[in-house]
């Protein structure tokens, strides 16, 4: 029976992607070629009690945030942030994850954990991304010591990149990479215990592929970042005088 088949498929997807809600799963199935009506799928979803597998969300507090406008071109602007204090292994090692996102396509350009991050480490990562991506017009970041360092400012000047600092205490002004941080937490880091930094990074890289190529993103019409980039293949390039 079709309902039984749909139920089995829903369980398969939710076992693989534990943190996905109904609409994420529904659009994922649509992208796999299934054209069932959303009302039918939701009826089966409710009957299988899949909506009860996650704890209920706490009520949101109403706040006013400054608008964050995404750029018009791929590679025009990047958002960078650190995800801190994830503990791995028997020695309770604290780590920090560098996340870099393309603010137009929402593509995760870099996600990797380190035992510590200095301005030099950050510049090494930026150079690696620039090698295959080219330079953006700007980088949006907070006021952490690595970002306000003289070394990073010199790197930005050399590459013709504007550093756009958000206001202190207003992470919503860097909301796109903050959303990437949250998604990485919920869909990857919160789901298991990691025995080493290497094991953590292996899982992060596996998740990054899913995030960029498989996972539907509601903010870009339930498409994937790679699909957005294929639709807009011309990157934002600038001539930088040396």
Image: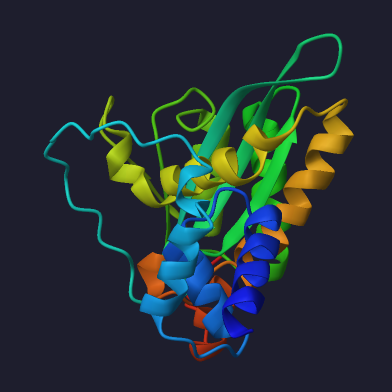
**Nearer the observer, 26 or 118:** 26
Image coordinates for residue 47, horizontal then vertical, percent: 47, 60
Q: Residue furthest top?
A: 91
Residue 8, picture quadrant = bottom right
Picture residue at 22% right of the left edge, 35% below the top: 60
Horizontal side, residue 4 vs residue 166: left or right: right
Residue 215 at least partly seen: yes
Picture residue at 58% right of the left edge, 33% below the top: 151
Picture residue at 63% right of the left edge, 33% below the top: 190
Image coordinates for residue 156, horizontal then vertical, percent: 51, 49
Residue 160 at least partly seen: no
Picture residue at 76% right of the left edge, 23% below the top: 115
Image height of 16 relative to 231, above or below: above
Quadrant placement of the C terminus = bottom right
Horizontal side, residue 35 vs residue 208: left or right: left
Image coordinates for residue 227, horizontal then vertical, percent: 55, 82
Q: Residue furthest front?
A: 1
* Count of number-bearing discs: 0
Image height of 165 relative to 4, above or below: above
**Nearer the observer, 70 or 53:** 53
Image height of 158 relative to 131, above or below: above
Quadrant placement of the N terminus = bottom right
Image coordinates for residue 82, horizontal then vertical, percent: 55, 33
């Amino acid at each position: 029976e079709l309902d039984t088949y749909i139920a089995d498929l829903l369980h398969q997807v939710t076992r693989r992607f534990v943190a996905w809600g109904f609409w994420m799963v529904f659009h994922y199935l649509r992208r796999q070629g299934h054209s069932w009506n959303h009302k039918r799928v939701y009826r089966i979803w409710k009957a299988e009690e899949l909506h009860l597998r996650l704890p209920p969300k706490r009520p949101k507090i109403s706040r006013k945030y400054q608008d964050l406008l995404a750029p018009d071109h791929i590679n025009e602007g990047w958002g960078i942030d650190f995800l801190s204090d994830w503990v791995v292994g028997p020695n309770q090692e604290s780590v920090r994850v560098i996340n870099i996102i393309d603010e137009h396509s929402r593509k995760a350009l870099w996600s990797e954990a380190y035992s510590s991050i200095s301005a030099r480490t950050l510049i090494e990562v930026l150079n690696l991304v620039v090698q295959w991506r080219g330079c953006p017009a700007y980088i949006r970041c907070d006021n952490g010591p690595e970002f306000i360092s003289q070394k990073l400012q010199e790197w930005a000047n050399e590459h013709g990149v504007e550093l756009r600092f958000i206001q202190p205490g207003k992470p919503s002004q860097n909301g796109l990479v903050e959303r990437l941080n949250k998604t990485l937490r919920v869909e990857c880091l919160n789901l298991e215990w990691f025995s080493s930094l290497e094991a953590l990074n292996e899982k992060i890289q596996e998740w990054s592929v899913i995030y960029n190529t498989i996972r539907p993103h509601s903010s870009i019409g339930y498409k994937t970042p790679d699909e957005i980039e294929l639709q807009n293949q011309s990157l934002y390039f600038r001539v930088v005088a040396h």
